[in-house]
Amino acid sequence: MKLDDEEQDILAGKLGPVPQQALRHQITVGDFFGAPDFVPVTQAHIMADTESLGAAGVRWLEGLAAATDGQRRVRIPTITDPRGTDFSKAAFLQHTPSMLDLERRAIAAFVKLGVLMTDTCINYQTIQAPTRNEHVAFGDTGVVIYSNSICGARSNFEGGPSAVSAGLTGRTPRYGFHLDAQRRATVHIRVGFAPASLNDWGALGAVIGRIAGNYWAVPAIEGIETAPGSDQLKHFGAAMASFGSVALFHLVGFTPEAGRLADVAPADLPSRRVDRADIDALQMSYRKDGKVDVVVFSAPQLSLFELRELAGLCTGRRFAVPLLAVTSPQVKPDADRMGYTARIEEAGGTVLSGMCFYQSYAREIAEAKGWKRLATNSAKLVNILGGYGYQPMLGSMQACVDAAATGRLE
Amino acid sequence: MSARGRIFRARQAMGRSVRGIALVAQDGFSARYDLDRIAGIFSRPAHKLAGQSYVGRILVLDTAKGGVASAWMLYEMQSRRMAPLAFVFNSANPILAQGAALGDVPMLAGFDEDITLAIPDGAEVEVNPELGVVTLFD
């Protein structure tokens, strides 16, 4: 990679060992992908729950935080994805003292590095959405696909070590979705129906993600007639990224780079059609048994509008099985003020903040609680939890709330 | 075919040379979605390698899938000596590259043929990132 004067100084250690280590990591990754140089970034977002970090990852962070020579703190606003617990609900989740200790150590290290503990995967709804052509270094696949596609920003999937590095150096290797050429569509999708519920949008994203199939694929989607809302696109993108590792899609007529199909796609693009039967088949593929041990709304964290809808559905109900609703630390105080938290919890549910279900020791929770059959309206969550020993089922928010009351998903 | 074995050239490479036994499938890889990292096995029931141990094996798979967690998880797995020996992908995504860089797991990606069809499961192979090649021994 071609390095400017400042980057050469960083690499030579003139700014201290922390940015030097960060830049070395970035060069290894940049060389792998043939990046010609670095591009300045304005924000970084770090996925670093302690289940992923483990003790080794926390020690790595503590090593950076312990540096006394040169620059130790991040140069640009650098924020965090959900943490591994909600400390106020740790007893309910049966998180162990060792999990909580690791979590506290990771937070302490991040704070020493100057990282802002926002603990959210919906920063584009709550903190600061990036703008068109703004280069950023975002972790969490749902954050990246939303920022690239809906906002027109430019980011690759930046895993925790690379997002930390970008925060420390204020730049990232220029490859992938920072480049115009990578943002062209590679597959055309014709949608033959109008998705309505959030689980329908998630299932549609899942089906398109499976068709696209890899990180470098960019679907251009036609057939959606009405502008979707932010929560619908949140579930759509998060599922597409989860099922297909996709980082960018174009929704023709709605997303900023695709006013017309010809703006993003050549005329001879291969085309596939997706109909309601396809998403119904995906959703039914998870229905092995209607019995439900737990209902979870999470992945991504719920917006205030989702919590408003959920609170409405919970009012006057009495749940037979646990219902968990997970939101961000920014939304939770508003949900408290608006009375949504109280209405969900009066029905027997639990509102959690600053974590995400699958990033918070889901396997250990399952073993401690005896939970296996899990109902959710998140297509992303059903995709992930199969590997964690759950039997996840996908349904509408209404059907999942009903399942919390009856113990069966109909 | 060379004197030593058949050679496949990769367009992308990082890490040190290693030699070992290939574990091959036409499927993807995500440390969070697919693995029981404590037991060291593929655990997602739908994965083609479900139930098989990946520890110390050279994984030959189609592409990286899913979330960003693999970037940390490879480092954590390596710290417990429970990581794959190397990765060989048809197509790599940034997360696996970032994770391999931090976790010191050699990786090759980008071949002219489907590498998951070219290398038989259980074969002895050498991954040489410096030369950008994987060698299949008879």
Image (tube, rainbow, N blue to C red):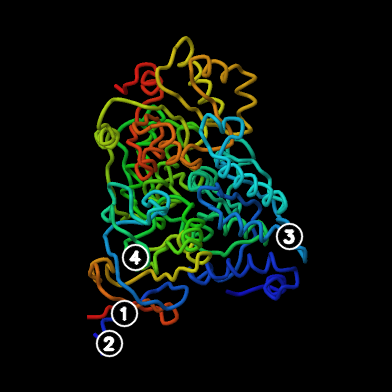
Type of the residue with mark 2: Arg
Tell me residue A217's x, y (percent): 38, 55
Q: Are marks 1 and 3 on the same chain?
A: no
Identify the chain of the residue marked 4, using the numbered disc in the image. B
Disc 3 element: loop
Classed neighbour count for the residue bearing mark 4: other residues with Cα under 10 Å, few (<14), some (14–19), many (≥20) = many
Image quarter where the N terminus of chain A lies is bottom right
Residue A357 vertical placement versus A141 (above, below): above
Disc 2 element: loop
Q: Are marks 3 and 2 on the same chain?
A: no
Q: Which residue is mark 3?
A: A72
The residue at the far bottom in this view is: B3
User: Real-space Cα distance between discs 3 and 2?
Assistant: 49 Å
Type of the residue with mark 1: Thr
Q: Which residue is mark 2?
A: B4
User: Real-space Cα distance between discs 2 and 4?
Assistant: 21 Å
Tell me residue A185's x, y (percent): 40, 53
Please report the residue visible at 25 percent of the width from the left and 73 percent of the height from the top.
B123
User: Real-space Cα distance between discs 1 and 3?
Assistant: 43 Å
Type of the residue with mark 4: Leu
* Circle on res. B59: 4
| First-in-chain label (2 vs 4) | 2
